[in-house]
Image (cartoon, rainbow, N blue to C red):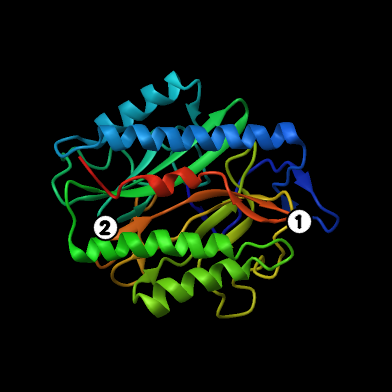
């Protein structure tokens, strides 16, 4: 689940010397816990690949996710999640179709999926006290050339961004790698104001990880913070085929493109190590783009 650049309610696990909160782990048992939670998310996406098809409603998909997470002895960390000014999130997962960028719910539409739809599914789990949180985008049965390029851009931007997450380097390196690929090379638009976040035993915590470079002082205070060894961070490009502007109804969760263009969402859980970034949800890259 994406976070905004505004303050996020959370219970961070560690406080560093200057008061900036990190989600940092070093003990082997903690790393094993984060790995297991991430693997639950990957396994849930694998099960979705075999389940998704035209004709399904968002309610049916969300019910399936709830059942399967329970079977994995996990539970959604999204359902009933609260932020100021919003009602509790109603779904086990974020189900964002076509022009919906993120935070789609099973209540926003009772229309069944049709051939050619794009659906971004964000899965957040709590497993033995640890969080796993990752999203992937799927096309139902077939896709247009534009949708294919958009999905390819999302996956490649995630790969390049993770590669840039080197210990001792600034968080801005992630955004620079992602933005250069998405906007400069591919001509698509990254959503502003939404981005990745630290996580651990809490779903959301600092740092905020923007997908675009700041253009004015103070726009992204964490930009020059460094990727620290042991940091757990969920990184997540949100990419529109048209303009970067998004909209949402007051007090409601779904965020959509203003111009009605297609959008994709890819998210990975990453542990920064002394030797470089380790993608705990790397198995998602093996999933097919077209399902059903």
Q: Give the residue at x 69% y 60%.
A: 227
Q: Can residue 59 be seen in this view?
A: no
Q: Is residue 148 above or below residue 21?
A: below
Q: Can residue 131 be seen in this view?
A: yes
In this orientation, which residue lies closer to the viewer: 70 or 217? 70
Give SS at disc 2: loop
Query: What crowding class fits label 1: few (fewer than 14 Cα within 10 Å), some (14-19), or many (20 or more)?
Result: few
Picture coordinates of residue 127, whole percent (x, y): 56, 28
Q: Is residue 250 above or below residue 42?
A: below
> Please, which residue is most extreme toward the right here?
17
List the residue tagged with mark 2.
99
Q: Is residue 94 above or below residue 71?
A: below
Picture coordinates of residue 244, whole percent (x, y): 37, 70
Picture coordinates of residue 36, whole percent (x, y): 58, 32
List the residue tagged with mark 1.
20
Q: Give the residue at x 64% y 65%.
A: 171
Picture coordinates of residue 52, whole percent (x, y): 24, 36
124 with respect to 259 (left or right): right
> In which quadrant of the rendered view does residue 182 lie?
bottom left
In the rendering, which numbered label is found on residue 89?
A: none
Q: If the image is split into quadrants, where does the C terminus sit?
A: top left
202 with respect to 18 (left or right): left
């Amino acid at each position: 689940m994406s976070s905004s650049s505004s303050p996020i309610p959370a219970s961070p696990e560690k406080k560093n010397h200057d008061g900036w909160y990190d989600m940092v782990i070093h003990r082997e048992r903690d790393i094993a816990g984060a790995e297991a939670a991430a693997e639950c998310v990957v396994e849930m996406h694998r099960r979705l690949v075999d389940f998704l098809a035209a004709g399904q409603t968002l309610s049916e998909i969300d019910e399936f996710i709830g059942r399967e997470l329970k079977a994995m002895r996990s539970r959604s960390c999204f359902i009933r999640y609260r932020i100021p000014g919003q009602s509790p999130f109603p779904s086990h997962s974020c189900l964002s179709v076509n022009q919906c960028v993120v935070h789609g719910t099973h209540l926003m539409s009772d229309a069944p999926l049709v051939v050619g739809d794009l659906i971004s599914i964000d899965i957040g789990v709590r497993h033995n006290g640890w969080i796993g949180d990752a999203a992937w985008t799927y096309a139902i049965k077939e896709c247009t050339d534009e949708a294919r390029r958009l999905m390819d851009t999302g996956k490649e931007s995630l790969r390049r961004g993770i590669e840039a997450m080197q210990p001792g380097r600034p968080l801005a390196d992630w955004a620079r790698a992602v933005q250069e690929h998405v906007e400069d090379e591919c001509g698509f638009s990254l959503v502003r104001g939404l981005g990745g976040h630290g996580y651990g035993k809490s779903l959301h915590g600092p740092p905020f990880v923007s997908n675009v470079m700041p253009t004015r002082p103070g726009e992204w205070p964490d930009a020059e913070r460094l990727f620290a060894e042991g940091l757990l961070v969920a990184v997540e490009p949100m990419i529109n085929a048209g303009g970067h502007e998004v909209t949402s109804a007051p007090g409601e969760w779904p965020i959509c493109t203003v111009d009605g263009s297609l959008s994709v969402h890819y998210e990975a859980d990453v542990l920064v190590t002394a030797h470089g970034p380790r993608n705990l949800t790397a198995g998602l890259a093996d999933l097919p783009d077209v399902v059903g």
